[in-house]
């Protein structure tokens, strides 16, 4: 009979296979259930209930407003915002808000957002052995990026080296990012950014198409784990609806998307479903992978099995990536910098010179490896103008056939394998700009050379 131990093993293997195929870190999409789990934080409905209880101008139970507006919490939030505004300007209410909120240009909803930020600002991570073990596994996972609809700052506490991007600023960031926390519904660090009322949601929905376009690249290339959402949550349905447009079947399995769901009733005899079917609109159903657990530690460890970003200076890496984007997008086209293209071409043609150009010093240093070999297999394929990593793999095999040099057999200026996990041969393959330059020449039928020391036996070191 199938049991929970078998279920865990099967899901762990499935996650490992997805990580191996993607060869990049997972992305987390975090909802309010995360804050409830780790800090006893409120859901949106509970937050509105508590805000209603604190405002004497809201004179009916929360249930009344939920019934009156047919469960539309955006409308309830707008009604409460008006009542907070009236209360704040009353003689008794004014003392509950800071003086700067009473300037003429302050929005009417500033008072309820201040109250919400004040309430959530007191959240603290629960200190229990079980939760600490989960959070240790989560930190070790080292996600590529985190997207959240939560207002609180728990994620910033858990990942202090990650850059926080709030609200509208998400649209202005470079697409080449790593180590970011995208707070798409705002943050208590900037109460005015909170998406809480109907007007806020109208603006968010208007801008959502830009957000979707920005995030779809992540969702297509990385394993994606939903944490802290129910399967019926509108945020999940919106993401999956956007993802479904990348596929043709009306009912499909999106293989790299998982939803993690809590169920304290799981026991040794349990074998929960491994997939979840959701209707996402326009007669489209999608299937995603479902993980059910009464402890998240093993799940986080499974998603961390592809290796973590150890010893990587995320701030320096983000600065380097941003500088390269500006160099290519602005500085070179507008001739703000002088480029010696002949010297650059020579450096690209010689793997050793190209490696030195980018400061490669020691392949045993994880920080150097990540900086100088930034591309996963799928990213390498895109850089070479191919649709899938199997295409770049064919070019690598062609180089081996023509020269005897197996790029993936060792750590070198073109390729490294970063070990992860205890299993023999486990690891993540990363590639350099030198590999991009070489494979572009191979693809285009151009003459290429390899560093002499990389050629073994009778392999020809002359131009091929």
Image (cartoon, helix red, strand yellow):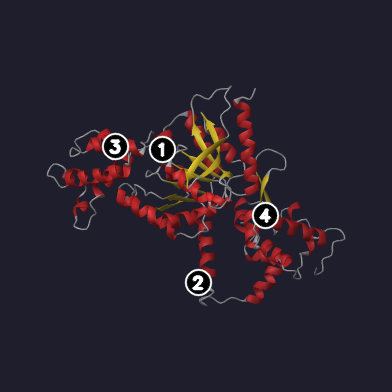
**SS state under label 4:** helix
Residue at 55%, 34% (x, y): give it: 291
Q: Position of residue 138 (x, y in %)?
A: 52, 39
Percent of width and height locating residue 262: 48, 31
Under circle 2, the secondary element is: helix
- With respect to residue 147, does 11 lie above or below? above
Residue position for label 3: 66
- The mark closer to the camera, 3 or 2, is 3
Q: Earlier in the sequence, mark 4 or mark 2?
A: 2
3 vs 4, front mark: 3
Looking at the rendered structure, the number of numbered marks drawn on it comes to 4
Measured in 3D between alpha carbons, the distance from the residue under mark 3 to the one under mark 2, in whole angstroms, is 51 Å
Name the residue beneath numbered marker 1.
Answer: 35
- Which of the two discs, 4 and 1, sits closer to the camera? 4
Give how far apart the Cα atoms at labels 3 and 1 are.
23 Å
Where, quadrant-wise, is the N terminus in this rendering? top right
Q: Which mark is drawn over residue 330?
A: 2
Residue 389: image tag? 4
Q: Residue at x 30, y 51 (%)?
A: 199
For marks 3 and 2 on the same chain, the one whose residue lies earlier in the sequence: 3
Pointer 4: residues within 10 angstroms few (<14), some, or many (20+)?
Answer: some
Q: Earlier in the sequence, mark 3 or mark 1?
A: 1
Query: What element does badge 1 sit on?
Result: helix
Seen from the viewer's position, the closer of residues 412 and 221 is 221
Contact flag, marks 3 and 2 (Cβ < 8 Å): no
Name the front one of labels 3 and 1. Answer: 3
* Among the 4 quarters of the image, the one containing residue 359: bottom right
Mark 1 vs 2, N-terminal side = 1
Element under disc 3: helix
In the rendered structure, which disc, 4 or 1, sits on the residue that comes first in sequence? 1
């Amino acid at each position: 009979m199938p049991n929970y131990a078998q279920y865990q093993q099967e899901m762990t293997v499935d996650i490992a296979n997805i990580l191996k195929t993607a060869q990049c870190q997972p992305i987390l999409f975090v909802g309010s259930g995360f804050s409830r789990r780790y800090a006893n934080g409120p859901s949106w409905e509970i937050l509105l209930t508590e805000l209603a209880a604190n405002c004497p101008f809201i004179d009916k139970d929360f249930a009344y407003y939920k019934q009156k507006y047919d469960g539309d919490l955006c409308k309830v939030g707008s009604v409460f915002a008006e009542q907070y505004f009236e209360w704040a300007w009353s003689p008794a209410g004014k003392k509950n808000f800071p003086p700067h909120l009473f300037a003429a240009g302050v929005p009417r909803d500033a008072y309820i957002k201040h109250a919400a930020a004040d309430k959530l600002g007191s959240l603290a991570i629960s200190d229990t052995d079980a939760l600490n073990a989960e959070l240790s596994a989560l930190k070790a996972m080292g996600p590529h990026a985190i997207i959240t609809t939560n207002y609180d700052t728990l994620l910033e506490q858990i990942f202090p080296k990650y850059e926080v991007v709030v609200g509208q600023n998400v649209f202005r960031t470079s697409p080449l990012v790593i180590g970011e926390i995208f707070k798409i519904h705002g943050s208590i660090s900037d109460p005015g950014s909170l998406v809480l009322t109907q007007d806020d949601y109208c603006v968010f929905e208007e801008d959502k198409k830009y957000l979707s376009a920005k995030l779809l690249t992540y969702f297509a290339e990385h394993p994606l784990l939903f944490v802290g959402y129910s399967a019926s949550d509108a945020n999940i349905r919106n993401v999956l609806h956007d993802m479904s447009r990348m596929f043709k079947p009306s009912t499909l399995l999106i293989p790299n998307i998982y939803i993690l769901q809590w169920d304290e009733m799981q026991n040794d005899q349990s074998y929960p479903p491994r997939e979840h079917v959701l209707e996402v609109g326009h007669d489209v159903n999608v299937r995603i992978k479902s993980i059910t657990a009464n402890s998240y530690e093993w799940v986080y460890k499974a998603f961390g099995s592809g290796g973590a970003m150890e010893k990587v200076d995320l701030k320096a890496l983000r600065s380097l990536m941003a500088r390269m984007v500006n160099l290519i997008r602005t500085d070179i086209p507008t001739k703000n910098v002088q480029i010696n293209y002949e010297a650059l071409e020579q450096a690209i043609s010689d793997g050793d010179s190209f490696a030195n150009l980018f400061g490669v010093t020691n392949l045993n240093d994880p920080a150097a490896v990540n900086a100088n070999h930034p591309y996963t297999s799928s990213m390498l394929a895109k850089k070479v103008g191919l649709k899938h990593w199997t295409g770049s793999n064919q070019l690598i095999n062609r180089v081996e056939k023509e020269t005897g040099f197996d790029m993936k057999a060792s750590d070198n200026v073109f390729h490294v394998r970063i070990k992860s996990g205890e299993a023999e041969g486990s690891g993540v393959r990363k590639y350099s700009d030198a590999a991009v330059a070489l494979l572009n020449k191979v693809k285009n039928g151009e003459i290429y050379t390899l560093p002499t020391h990389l050629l073994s036996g009778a392999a020809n070191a002359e131009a091929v």
